[in-house]
Image: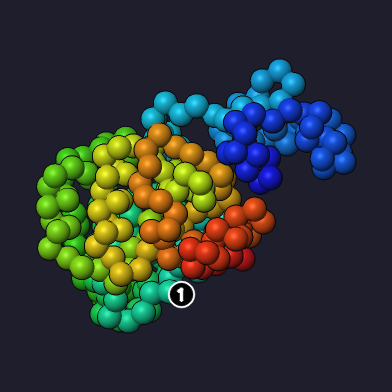
Amino acid sequence: MIILNKLDIDGKVTVKELSKEFQVSTETIRRDLEILENEKRLKKVYGGAIKISFDGSEPPYNHRETLHIHEKRIIGKKAADIVQDNDMIVIDVGTTTLQIIHHLLHKNNLTVLINSIPALTLLLEYKQRGLFSGRIIFLGGEINAEQMTTFGSIAEKTLEAFYLDKAFIAVGGLSVKHGITSYDVQEGTLSRKLIMHAKEVIVMADHSKLGVRNFYRIVDIDAVHAVICDKEPPKEWQDDLNDKCITWITAT
């Protein structure tokens, strides 16, 4: 994580400098950089690594749904603990936010807004089996077939009718410097509007999103009330999180 923080600030790191700072072999540093490159969090270059350059594209939904699945499940379970009976919530599109749905079955009198087709399918299945008793409101609109979501003016117009207790937001990247970011302008625009309509904003992000900056800025970090992640925040972030009164919840 410190490597990504250095990239966030300096734009480049070298194997030699990291090896000296962490007092480990250069081979260890190279292996760490290789892992991070495989996760598409940086780009290796001769002698070190640079910030990854995003082209605005995101892997299709079915390519992402099993990535870091254990982490996403524990984050979803922890997020459900925040939901109270009678809440009106919105669940943003994403493979991490989807996991919260499995843990809402014992909640009473919920209203759930969604614009994710997999989330709608899952909620309908639970509803038909008598396991979920709340209301489901689908924000219809133009369909993104690859990501299995809706977006655009129709979805945004429907959202305008509602004020929400809690918004559970998915992100492509999370950084104290660059805020929360998205691969896609259309989805990011709708996520921003979800945030604007909610009393409480909870970001759900596994560790692979930390220190990452994507193509489109959704909001600055100070618009967020809480972050749920499977890892502790980087130490370098702690003062900023405290200053902005952001609660960090570590899911285990």
Callout 1 crowding tier (Cα within 10 Å): few <14, some 14–19, many ≥20: few
Q: Which residue is drawn at 37% across and 63% down?
A: 201
Please provide percent x and percent y for residue 163: 20, 68
Which residue lies most toward the top here?
46
The residue that appears at 22% across and 45% down in the rendered structure is 150
Residue 242 vs residue 196, the one in the foreground: 242
The percent position of residue 17, horizontal first and vertical second, equals 79, 32
Q: Is residue 27 left or right of residue 5?
A: right
> Image point 50% across, 26% down: which residue?
53
- Name the amino acid type tagged 1: Asp
- Position of residue 32 relative to residue 168, above or below, is above
Q: Is mark 1 on a helix, strand or loop?
A: loop
189 relative position to 249: left or right: left
179 or 54, which is in the foreground? 179
Measuring from the top left, give residue 44's x and y in whole percent.
Answer: 65, 24
Residue 214 visible in the shown view: yes
In the depicted structure, whether residue 191 falls above or below residue 91 = above
Q: Label 1 belongs to which residue?
A: 81
Left or right, 77 with respect to 250, comes to left
| Residue farthest toward the front in the current orientation of the protein | 243
**Residue 151 locus on image (x, y percent):** 22, 44
Q: How many marks?
A: 1
| Colouring method of the image | rainbow
Instruction: Using the image, determine if residue 228 lies above or below residue 27.
Output: below
Image quadrant where one finds the C terminus = bottom right
Q: Quadrant of residue 203?
A: bottom left
- Closer-to-camera residue (41/63): 41
- Residue at x 52%, y 41% (from the top left corner): 212
